[in-house]
């Protein structure tokens, strides 16, 4: 299948590791020029080097940025356009907010979650959209979570905000499809990343079991019988970014091994 992504410019947020990194790698392997951001300069540099090792020198750039800070997002977008030109593909992404039940959360935690999980999506979309609309072609893919469709009691903030991003996805798609910009969301299930290990640690402490037992329990709860690999989520992102998905918009796509059909 010809995905027609050669020399498209892609921005992938929070992409020094995990699913974001896998998405950036996959887009670069299809010929995109990729700009990634992360807060840690060392891990960001390693990620850029690995992408360029596979895709070629000059195919990736990294900008140190915190997605919860508006000035950082503006600088990242400005540096990307200055290096590669207008953005064709935007993948929004962030690490998950604190894992906790409702009564254990403070106002400060809610506010931090809104800034890092929701407002970065709003701000990045606002930065990338003018050029997409002007050229009549664009792809926005919001990387969110299974909890947008299947709430989790210990992921209260994430469940609330990512459900809202699914609504935003639909609203953006309605407003932008006629202008050549397609907007979709990818909702990963439990995926073997640092976040999955962190959640396993939190749940192991709460349940009095080992972290390994918590991970095994998570795998057993998935009809596919295992956690996802980051590259499996990345494959869905690349497809939605491609010309092959030219009639798909407004979708919140579960990539979860069937998890939404059973309890977490």
Image: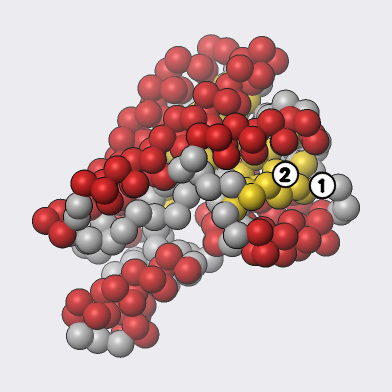
Seen at 45% across and 30% down, the residue is: 122
Q: Residues within 10 Å of mark 2 (few under 14, many from 20)?
A: many
Q: Position of residue 7 (x, y in %)?
A: 81, 36
The answer to the question of whether label 1 and label 2 lie on touching residues, with beta carbons closer than 8 A, is: yes
Seen at 64% across and 35% down, the residue is: 75
Seen at 83% across and 61% down, the residue is: 53
Sooner in the amino-acid sequence: mark 1 or mark 2? 2
Q: Position of residue 246 (x, y in %)?
A: 60, 27
Q: Residue furthest left?
A: 103
Instruction: Choose between 199 and 138: the one closer to the eye.
Output: 199
Which element carries disc 2, helix, strand or loop?
strand
Q: Is residue 126 left or right of residue 130?
A: left
User: Where does the N terminus fall, quadrant-wise?
Assistant: top right
Q: Is residue 42 left or right of residue 234?
A: right
Q: Position of residue 207 (x, y in %)?
A: 19, 80
Q: Residue furthest right?
A: 57
Q: Position of residue 96 (x, y in %)?
A: 39, 55
Instruction: Choose between 42 and 204: the one closer to the eye.
Output: 42
Residue 59 — which label?
Answer: 1
Locate residue 16: give its quadrant: bottom right
Q: Is residue 68 left or right of residue 72?
A: left
Q: Residues within 10 Å of mark 1 (few under 14, many from 20)?
A: many
State whether residue 77 is above or below residue 40. above
User: Where does the C terminus fall, quadrant-wise?
Assistant: bottom left
Locate residue 216: give its quadrant: bottom left
Residue beneath disc 2: 34
């Amino acid at each position: 299948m010809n995905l027609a992504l050669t020399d498209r410019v892609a921005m992938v947020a929070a992409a020094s590791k995990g699913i974001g990194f896998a998405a950036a790698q996959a887009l670069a392997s299809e010929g995109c020029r990729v700009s990634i951001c992360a807060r840690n300069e060392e891990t960001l540099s390693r990620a850029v080097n690995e992408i360029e090792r596979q895709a070629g020198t000059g195919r990736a750039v990294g900008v140190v940025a915190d997605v919860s800070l508006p000035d950082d997002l503006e600088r990242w977008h400005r540096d990307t356009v200055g290096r590669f030109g207008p953005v064709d593909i935007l993948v929004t992404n962030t690490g998950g907010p604190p894992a906790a039940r409702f009564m254990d959360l403070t106002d400060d935690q809610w506010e931090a979650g809104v800034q890092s999980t929701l407002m970065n999506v709003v701000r990045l979309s606002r930065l990338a959209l003018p050029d997409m609309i002007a050229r009549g072609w664009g792809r926005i893919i919001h990387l969110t979570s299974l909890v947008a469709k299947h709430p989790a009691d210990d992921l209260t903030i994430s469940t609330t905000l990512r459900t809202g991003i699914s609504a935003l996805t639909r609203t953006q798609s309605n407003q932008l499809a006629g202008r050549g910009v397609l907007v979709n969301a990818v909702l990963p299930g439990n995926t073997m990343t640092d976040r999955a290990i962190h959640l396993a640690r939190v749940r192991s402490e709460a349940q009095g079991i080992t972290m390994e037992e918590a991970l095994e329990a998570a795998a057993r709860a998935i009809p596919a019988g295992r956690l996802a690999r980051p590259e499996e989520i990345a494959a869905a992102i690349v497809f939605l970014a491609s010309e092959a998905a030219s009639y798909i918009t407004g979708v919140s796509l579960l990539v979860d091994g069937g998890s939404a059909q059973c309890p977490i």
